[in-house]
Amino acid sequence: MKRLWLILPLALFAVFLGVAGYQLTQPKDEFVRSTMIGKPLPAFDLPGATDEAPRVASASFADGQPRLLNVWATWCVPCIAEAPQLEELAERGVPIVGVAIRDEPEAIARFLENYGNPYEVIARDDIAELQLGLGSSGIPETFVVDGDGIIRYQHIGDIRADDVDEIYAAWEDAR
Amino acid sequence: MIAELGLAALWLAAGLCVLQLFAGVLGARAGDDGVVSALTRPAAIVQGLVLLVSFACLLRVFAVTDLSVALVAANSHADKPLIYRISGAWGNHEGSMLLWVTILGLCSALVAAFERRMDDRFMKSMLAAQAFIGLGFIAFLLFSSNPFARLNPPADFGAGLNPLLQDIGLALHPPTLYLGYVGLSVAFSFVVAGLVTRQAGPELARVMRPWVLAAWIALTLGIAAGSYWAYYELGWGGWWFWDPVENASLMPWLAATALLHSVGVLAARDALRTWTIMLGVVAFSMSMVGTFLVRSGILTSVHAFAVDPERGGFILALLALYVGGAFALFALRAGALAEGKRFATISREGALVFNNVMLSAILAVVLLGTLYPLLAEAFGTRVSIGPPYYNPVTAVFAVPMLLVLLVGPMLRWKRDKLSRVRVPVALCVAILAAGLTVLVFFTEAGVLSTIGLALAAALALASWFPLRGRKLRRVPLALWGSMLAHFGIAVSLFGMASESAFSIERLVAVEAGDVVEVGPFTASLRAVEPVAGPNWSALQGDILVSRGGSETVLQPQARYFTEPAQNTSEAALLTRWDGQLYAILGDAAGEGRWQLRLWWKPFVTLIWYGALLIALGGLLSIFGHLRGSARSRKIREEVARRRAEKERRARA
């Protein structure tokens, strides 16, 4: 029994080496597409960002208007970095629905006050149910959802300045 | 010429490493008293000096901005102030690895020159282990990260240093952190030598202790410096982000803190032998894992280091060799170590074991959080893990640990009764209860910050309890050190909890003359004007801040650096005894209005003052232990001398 305990650190370390070594040989693919592309938005009905705000449901997406669905959180640093780009998209007329993952109403209010509010509405996803349903595993992530509520495009990670045009084009395509 | 000299010195150091390794291994074999193995110590000392020469050459080429050296051209610019030209030498991959190796060499040299307490075989094994580590990293420099590579033809201009790094924080943060990382290698080599020569008793612990303490102090200061630097330089107003690179520095600190305490148990009571040995390996492994994660770019981080999979592979191979080798040695040998003395659950050892288990649990939590994205990615999913995981999960272990810390240092070694410490325990409970009541009913602090504030108050008092029943003049220096460090924990914890509970934040768009209230201050923007620096120009806000009749001017800047072109935000900080006012000048908001971000952060500075106290406590502890060990050596020599004299007389 004691022998096993002594080997344990070595075994754990071997697992780490295996995973790290495997990851090093993998090309750094930043674009793992969600299998949800081309499929309808999973059904959801989430509370609004603040207690007074209206609830946000999947039904409201199928009204003929394509939208961006931005998965973010106030505790996520890259989300601060992408705020100006979202602002720009909103100024160019793209409606954006935000989904705040595991967040607090006060923190959301503060974030919006600091970094601007490009959102049409914001939903609060306290147990990451929509995030999981979307096949999104990281924050931030942004989806283009067309007027029939079908997911058309996915952007992984923060939106950089040079991503804006591509996302705008994807939104245009979905019209 | 200087660059070639530096490179030659590096090759020479590699040769000396081979010699040190070879001589050390010969000397580690039983019964060897050969000529070659006698070279181990001299080789180590010369190697340290040669590496110092090499590093001095690097400093020189950076100081004079020798643009025929590729590294300088890529990372420096003649227009920078001298201090940043020099600190730029380690603000890049190659230079920082050379610094790493140089510190390693100097540590070996110090051990070789001054450590005489262990027997010869042990010391040779130890120095051989150091040489083995050094050789790997020198090879890494020579074959994949040569800092002295020439550029032909030389560049006309340097590319400059990332402006965020042009700060006094960078001059201090990496070297101190490296001192800590590398200092742990000394503990590692001691432990390896202990396994090789089957010595894992109190003597090993006493020899290791100053090194572990020194490395731990450096880590504490390095992490604190990094945190403060991020706090004022990034302009996000936060001081810890649970970023992978931050975690990479926190993990060795956690392991070193555990090691420090278990080394204390081993030195005083000859208990926890296997555990101490394992922690010695784990602590340095964490520094190496940190180096790997940071340098390979395998994880996504806000720290944008140059990423290179080939280098990542090299470091991973070194990691496998050293850490894998040490763990394998541990699996083979540790079973044969006698387990050491037993103790009761309620005893100083018992409390320290609890502290060790909790620290290891926190380490595991942070390690899991840091590596989980890597693991998940291997299965095709991508995740990002942030404060919602780290804060509560680490607290689950940190809170019980701090509760035990209230009592632990008062307990006696071997066996004690809680009834003996009834009065102080009751006092702590009273402070905790009072603190919790006041905070819950009169403030809106969150759960964690409430617990943190109450615990900090109790700990601030409890850390001095070990003085009970002692004459002040006779309290040993090492005990002052430990009390001060624990008090530092309380101070730092108070700062963290207060910052998170009571910070006030205002974001406003104002024009000149507008007045904003933030916490106890009123701030009014008087003007925004351009100013010019050596390699940047900036817009500078001029904000008149007043509280209770006293007025100060804050001047936050939005800087535009030219080489390389980049914008940074320079926060203006107003420090008062009870907190900091933090001001950021944002973008122009149109119609002559400017965005201002203002924070009032009560007692935030205590976070870093606490860290300084912790480090100071460690320093006192080192001196105390060194003095104690010198004194006991003197006594032992005196005893031996008298015995010899007595025998001589008896014979006569």
Image: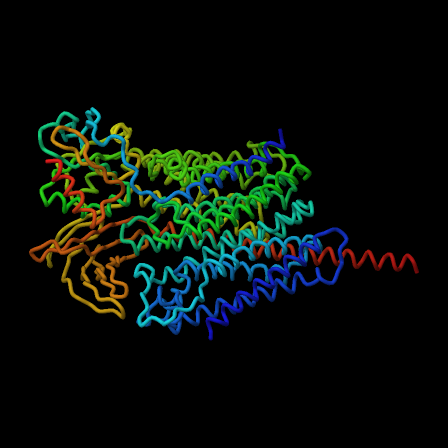
Image: A121 above or below B262 = above
Task: Judge left or right: residue A32 versus residue B204.
Answer: left
The C terminus of chain A: image quadrant: top left
Where residue B54 sits in the image (x, y, percent)?
50, 68
Query: Which residue is most to the left?
Result: B591
Where residue B477 sits in the image (x, y, percent)?
56, 54
Image: B73 above or below B392 = below
Residue B430 versus residue B463: which sits nearer the camera?
A: B463
Report the residue at 45% width, 67% height from top: B148
Task: Judge left or right: residue B321 versus residue B386.
Answer: right
Image: B227 above or below A110 = below
Q: How many marks on residues? A: 0
Task: Judge left or right: residue A64 versus residue B292.
Answer: left
Query: Which residue is most to the bottom?
Result: B1
Report the residue at 60% width, 60% height from top: B17
The N terminus of chain A: image quadrant: top right
Report the residue at 68% width, 39% height from top: B337
Where residue B169 sits in the image (x, y, percent)?
37, 59
Residue B164 seen anywhere in this rendered image of the structure: yes
Q: Quadrant of residue B562?
A: bottom left
